Amino acid sequence: MPTDPAATGDYRTDVAILGGGLAGLTLALQMRQQQPQLQVTVIERRAHPVREAAHKVGESSVEIGAHYFAEVLGLREHLDAEQIRKFGFRFFFSDRSAEVDRCTELGVSQLMPTPSWQIDRGRFENHLGERARALGVRFDDGAVVRGIDLADGDADHLVRVEHDGATHAVHCRWVVDASGRAGLLKRKLNLAMDNDHAANAVWWRVDGFVDPNAWSNDTQWLQRCDPPDRWRSTNHMCGPGYWFWLIPLSSGAHSLGIVCDAALHPLDTMNTHEKAMDWLRRHQPQVAATLERSEHALQDFMFLRNFSYGCKQVFSRDRWALTGEAGVFLDPFYSPGSDFIAISNTYICDLIARERAGRDISHHADLYQQLYLSFYENTLTLYQDQYPLFGDAQVMPVKVIWDYTYYWALLAPLFCAGRMTDLDTLGRLRPAFNEARALNLAIQPLLRAWGLCNAEGPAPESRLLDQFQIGWFRDMNGALNTPLDTAAFVDRINANVARMRWLASEVLQRARAMHPHIDDHGLDALLAGEVTPASLPPVWYADAA
């Protein structure tokens, strides 16, 4: 005879979300906002509220994630009042340099039109938890998942949860794994997959803000930015095979991290705070000298080996899904983590809404799976085998402009326009996506070859390469939130891909001007139409019509 649920604490919910971090809480909010009648339960191991400056990667947002937080979830007021408006990305090509103002700097002198924020994860997740409870989400914090039984057919799934020393059963129509690197469903279903991107990371937090402007007395250098707020940027200190991040947090701490190619900078040279500081003294002496000051006391320290990974499946027609780091994780260089949370959560919400409406979700689950993993695989090409370039002050600015153009041309406008699930429009855009992908697959190895040719060349003189002054680049950013009807939107994407084609030609000409015999990796033939994108593997693998 079944046990009385009232006596054991057993209960039923429409959706059980395993994990109450960034991915799980934002998903819960999105579901309740879109379907107020939906019963949503979040099961989280940590007790809430958590401490601010929580020890998590994912503090820097970019356009998709920022739009998701501010506009889709309606959190703009919190972001403006309680987080830090980001002053864009900033790159210093500064390996072993004691004078940052003598290095090549890539960044903006003024704020770009589309906003993004530096996110104090502890403060943000506490706010998300409060919002979720206010919207009627059942939020069981201090609870540990002890088992998951996925049902066959139309029966409910079962999640066994330990809470306050007692174990109870949660019966759910849908189960979503948002447990981060614990990967509860990924482990259970053997979904883990290597992605051939061998990189490691160490990171820590210190008291107080670290301001790059304090590293120089050069008035001209200081006045290159208006306002002079370099500290609000996601600052990248770059060298061969690595980059070092500096991200300010609104709680008054600064987040710091070394990310590196595993072959070029072994993890055992930096996997303690003392070793990491020794590494900084060799590669970023000006940063190290600042961090040795008493006002920047150490708060915490962590390292991750082989942090990047794929996943065989993230969405299922059998009413389960993975989101956030429970599924895939790319690389923090361009801060795509919250972008992929936004995309996966949007697909999950759509699948649940369709299934609750009595529709067969088989086709959509398969298509969203293919789309999501294709977005992941195409973004991975921006990082794979590219870390040796990171110290090249000639090639890397070109790469950053290209990579951002690719992002703002396709995926970012698609999300910001709310068209991630618009299959008719996706079908019309398929040729544009395929062409953009083909161009990128030729450009990335060309950039690598260019960097190899530059290996013995001199470094450029000190300069600011101001992305704000590139008019078309600034306009692409500003256009992300322009409302357009379908025909105008398709025209905009096609024009963006034409811009990519022009830029690819410019990159090839510049590389050849310096190295006439450089391998173009098929770019010439692609630009001349001798090889068509349709002859290459497509950007997604199902009919989006």
Image (tube, grey):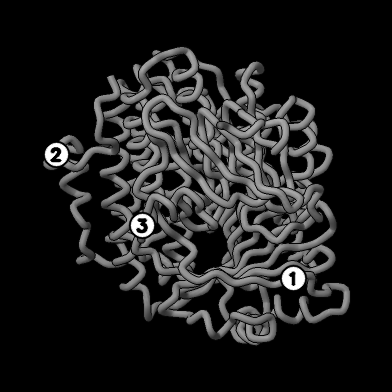
Between marks 3 and 2 in the image, the one whose residue lies nearer the viewer: 3
Residue 512, image quadrant = bottom left
Q: Secondary structure at mark 3?
A: strand
Q: Which one is earlier in the sequence, the residue at label 1 or at label 2?
A: 1
| In the image, residue 116 above or below residue 271 | above
User: Residue 211: image x %, image y %?
Assistant: 78, 64
Look at the numbered disc 1 and give the secondary structure of its residue. strand
Mark 3 or 1: the one toward you: 3
Q: Are marks 3 and 2 in contact (CB under 8 Å)?
A: no
- What amino acid type is highlighted by mark number 1? Asp
Q: Which residue is mark 1?
A: 300
Q: What's the CA distance linking mark 1 and mark 2?
A: 51 Å
Q: CA distance from mark 3 to mark 1?
A: 30 Å
Counting residues from the start of the chain, the first of labels 3 and 2 encountered is 3
The answer to whether one can see residue 114 in this image is no
Residue 222 showing in the rendered view: yes
Q: From the image, state whether disc 1 or disc 2 is nearer to you.
A: 1
Location of the C terminus by quadrant is top left
Q: Mark 1 or mark 3, which is nearer the start of the sequence? A: 3
Residue 54, image x, y percentages = 74, 57
Mark 3 Cα within 10 Å, few/some/many (few <14, many 20+)?
Answer: some
Viewer-proximal residue, 407 or 65? 65
Residue 503 - label: none
The amino acid beneath tag 3 is Met
Per the image, the residue denoted by label 2 is: 535
Question: Considering only vertical position in the picture, is 115 above or below 195?
Answer: above
The mark found on residue 193 in the picture is 3
